[in-house]
Image (spheres, coloured by chain):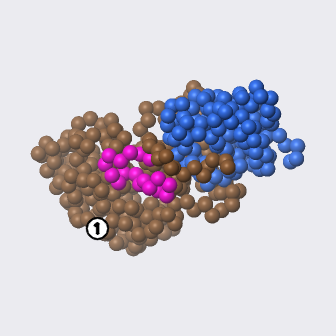
Chain colours: A blue, B brown
Amino acid sequence: MSNFEPKILAFLCNWCSYGAADLAGVSRMEYPANIRVIRVPCSGSMSPKFILEAFRQGVDGVWVSGCHPGDCHYISGNLYARRRFQLLKNLLEYIGIEPERLHFTWISSAEAGRFQEKAKQIVEAVKKVGPANEKKKLIKELKPIA
Amino acid sequence: MLEGYTKEIREAAKRLIRDKKVDCVIGYSKGSIPLVDAPYFAYTEEECENLVWSGFCTKNLAKYLIKRLGKNALVAQGCVSRSIVGLINENQVKRENVYILGIWSPGMVDRRKVLERVGGKEIIDVKEDEEKLVVIGDGWEEEIKRKEVLRQNCYTCASRNAVLFDEFIGEKKESKGGGDIDNVAAPWEKLSIDERWEKFRETFKECIRCYACRNVCPLCYCAECFVDESRPQWCGKTQDEADVYTFHILRAFHCAGRCVDCGACESACPMGIKMRVLTSKLEKDIRNMYGYEPGMELGAIPPLSVYRPDDPENFITP
Ligand code: SF4
Ligand code: SF4
């Protein structure tokens, strides 16, 4: 397991967390290459479908990050999302998806350090639970993602 | 069939049709096989004679109000009336277009439990009163206490009396199912993460994707269901495990904050799948975190359409 390198899909909101990832990049702050980023307009635009699809496509972990509550570019997108994510995370844990595979954070566009720190932390957490396909959980067919 | 209630329903229905108060009375009629009563649409006074009330009225009639024209009367026990409230709140039904014949439910019967009780022998007819069923076969008869063969959701019912009605059939009676829903809503919570997955897999593996559970549910009125979407296709159409699981996770999630636990989905499933195990978990979380119970109050805003500044957020990675 020690050389297991998980694939983690990160959905980052355009206005805050993606900005933080960008800033981390231009500031030459290194974070593990296990993270693949998809930019979304707002954490409020995230559907549970996207998260399930990521698992179906064979990722080992999913990370969703948006603006801090109160800082949403669309005022309240992340506050609606908060209820959805809370319920979804509870539900997935309830059916046996390890909570270590699914992460949510609030990161503002100035918090490059926090982005780096969370990225490392999440990669470690997913490494600990191992590859998602080991138990063939939600995966339909293993299509490697680039 | 419960004679007293049946008689009252027929009389009320005939009166409504005669006085042209409604175009149609939607209720149940005796099914073509024992233990299953069927939805029925009575447009004339004669047709009203076919309406019945029994322990086998397991479909949720509120479903028929969606996109229905004209003014309709509907026979509604607690859960069905709660579904109507939900549909009104979600702007799918206009209050003035439905005349609710509220009624008390004695608790609906789980057909599978009865079949199991009689050891799979062929049942020809059933007689019932509020307390018991008498199951009749070829040359045999067996008496069964109703409360031993109820559907699981009926044991923990929050309101057996209709919560919203224009007229009440019979008397209001004990409204609670008796059981504590919070004790049974999320049975897998005490298991380890891998045991949970085993249970989940075990529960859903026989699903044949017939969608009876979706079609019967009054919450499922989307113009295009996610299972029918093809570009992009979020949920494959096969019976492959992953597709079945995706279907059930999303189906349950789409019902979050809306499911009244009417049990129609479980009653309709040809494979005997107990899919309420997911919806009841979601509703439990919603009660605990947001203090909301669906279908109890006209004008209530569904919990996923609002937020509070101090909503719990223990899902956040610390
Ligand atoms: S999900 Fe099942 S129990 Fe809930 S409202 Fe729909 S049919 Fe009724
Ligand atoms: S009714 Fe039963 S078999 Fe049909 S789709 Fe629903 S759970 Fe699957």
Q: Quadrant of residue A118?
A: top right
Chain of the residue that carries numbered disc 1 in the rendered image:
B
Coordinates of residue B98 in the picture (x, y in percent): 25, 44
- For residue A74, say whether it is visible: yes
**Residue at point 37%, 66% (across, down):** B176
When the figure is inspected, residue B310 is found, relative to residue B233, above or below; the finding is below
Q: Mark 1 packing: few (<14 Cα in 10 Å), some, or many (20+)?
A: few
**Residues drawn in magenta:** B287-303
**Residue at point 52%, 36% (across, down):** A77
When the figure is inspected, residue B267 is found, relative to residue B191, above or below; the finding is above
Q: Amino acid at mark 1?
A: Lys
Label 1 element class: loop
**Residue at point 39%, 66% (across, down):** B177
- Which residue position holds label 1? B173
Coordinates of residue B28 in the picture (x, y in percent): 30, 52
User: Residue extending furthest left?
Assistant: B19
**Residue at point 11%, 45% (across, down):** B19
Residue situated in front as seen by the camera: A82 or B113:
A82
Residue situated in front as seen by the camera: A87 or B30:
A87
Please check the rendered image and state whether residue B133 is part of the magenta-colored stretch, yes or no.
no
Quadrant (top left, top right, bottom left, bottom right) of the N terminus of chain B: bottom left
Coordinates of residue A26 in the picture (x, y in percent): 76, 26
Q: Quadrant of residue B72?
A: top left
